[in-house]
Amino acid sequence: MFYFLQVPAANVADSLHKVSSAATSEKISMIDLLSKGGWIMYPLYALFAASIFVFFERLLAIRKASKIDDKFLSIVRDNIVNGNISAARALAKNTNNPVGRMIDKGLQRIGKPIDAIEKSMENVGKLEMYQMERNLSVLSLIAGIAPMFGFLGTIIGMIQLFYNINNSGFELNTIAGGIYVKMVTSGSGLIVGLIAYVGYSFLTTQIDKTVYKMEAASAEFIDILQEPTK
């Protein structure tokens, strides 16, 4: 009676050990998984590093450009109303942001028609916007080509896989393992492209907010010029 009870117990323990061993063997680290993508992963690594660098470089530049002192235009207005244009210009020159440079250009054109002042400030605004958008095209490019690199790696891997099947024969385990390995590049390319696209969209939104502040400051400055002086 005791012998018959021992046999199932031993079998159950052996089965549990096999299941545990199989579960352990199926685990794979992310680094090992990425390394199976082959040489095509290196361009994807470079694209990922470039997208991260461009994103944070542009983010810092845009945030610096968007910092505008709430009292800046009030001080400029007081100086203009009092006829102290030189003090207003000195303040604008010392204000290192797009709004300060736009106002400085407007102050330089005081005495000319309002349309000419608006035009000159608009030109400065376009240049400042171009500076903020600099290198954003890199993120847009990465968002487009990273998935293509990933698909290219998958296609190359599948060609190699079918070539090996043609030479070595059909084995289901080999095919399944080869397919999931080759899909690593597609997944990586999509992730890199998604990161670049999200970064591009976020920075574009931040630029739009800064441009709105610039337009509002320009309109307020034109209104100040039309106020009577003391």
Image (cartoon, grey):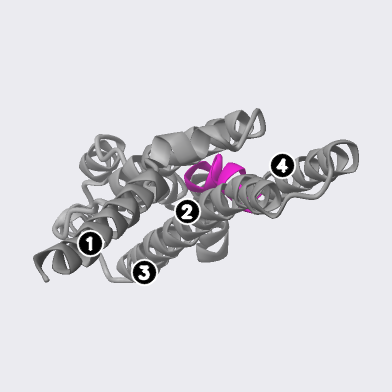
145 or 135, nearer to the observer:
145
Residue 57 at x, y percent in the picture: 39, 37
200 or 224, nearer to the observer:
200
| Residue beneath the point at 43% across and 64% down | 205
Q: Is residue 120 above or below residue 89?
A: below
Residue 185 placement: quadrant: top right
SS class, disc 1: helix
Whether residue 210 appears in magenta in the rendering, the answer is no
Tell me which segment is drawn in magenta.
Answer: 130-143
SS class, disc 2: helix
Disc 4 packing (10 Å; few <14; some 14–19; many ≥20): many
Q: Which mark is residue 195?
A: 2
Q: Tell which tag, 3 or 2, sits nearer the viewer.
A: 2
Q: From mark 4 to mark 1, how far is it between C-alphas?
A: 51 Å
Q: Residue furthest left?
A: 2
Task: Check disc 1 and report the residue beneath it.
Answer: 7
